[in-house]
Image: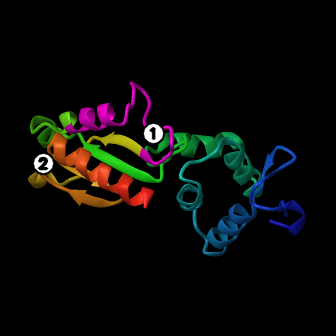
Amino acid sequence: MSTEQQIQVSPSRRNGQRQFFRLNEIIAEQTAANRSLIAILQAVQEEYRYLPEEVLTYIATALNLSPATVFGVATFFAQFSLEPKGRHLVTICDGTACHVKGSMSAYDAICRKYDLKEGQLTTPDMLFTLETVACVGACGLAPVMIVNGKTHGQINPEAAVAIVDKLREEEEK
């Protein structure tokens, strides 16, 4: 990517357009390491906590790919999100072992406590995103909840809410 192709402004918005300093760095790092589009999308999502549409379009332009190709990859893999995620990711396993042992009651308890309605995954303050996954592969610990990559086994609704509440308390300090 040539210097002329890079947008050289601050990381905020200017004139209604998102600024791409960090995005340019990610693309340069990944392409220098001969990484794939998937690796670039992973790095971008780690930076932004989701994949904004305008960022996907920018990546397509920077890599000389069609926007359809980039959007196709971003929407094909479940690891990518086109919606903003909260600072803390709370994942409830709903695989067979976890489901049978009541994982969804923990999910429902968190939804009730944080007033998450049907189809709403992220709290309005962007602090938490609650998701379910088909299986985390820790069936012996069922039911399982993963918070920011840390696995919590044999959870119940009260324990699940307490873990999330503790994070909220730490954020308020």
Residue 19, numbered label: none
In the image, taking residue 58 as reference, residue 14 lies left or right, namely right
Q: Secondary structure at mark 1?
A: loop
- At a point 61% along the width and 71% down the height, the residue shown is 34
Residue 142 position, x and y percent, is 12, 48
For disc 1, the neighbor class at 10 Å (few under 14, some 14 to 19, many from 20) is some
| Closer to the camera in the image, 138 or 101 | 101
Residue 142, numbered label: 2
Which quadrant: the C terminus? Answer: bottom left
**89 within the magenta span:** no
- At a point 31% along the width and 49% down the height, the residue shown is 165
Residue occupying the far right of the picture: 4
Q: Which residues are magenta?
A: 106-128
In the image, taking residue 160 as reference, residue 140 lies left or right, namely left
Which secondary structure type mostly characterizes the magenta part of the structure?
loop
Q: Is residue 24 above or below residue 95?
A: below
- Residue type beneath disc 2: Ala
Residue occupying the far top of the picture: 118
Residue 57 position, x and y percent, is 72, 46
**Front tag of 1 and 2:** 1
- At a point 19% along the width and 34% down the height, the residue shown is 105
Q: Secondary structure at mark 2?
A: loop
Q: Which residue corresponds to mark 1?
A: 123
For disc 2, the neighbor class at 10 Å (few under 14, some 14 to 19, many from 20) is many
Residue 36 position, x and y percent, is 58, 62
| Closer to the camera in the image, 159 or 80 | 159
Residue 150 position, x and y percent, is 29, 61
Q: Is residue 104 above or below residue 166?
A: above
In the image, taking residue 44 as reference, residue 60 lies left or right, namely right
- At a point 59% along the width and 60% down the height, the residue shown is 40
Q: CA distance from mark 1 to mark 2?
A: 26 Å
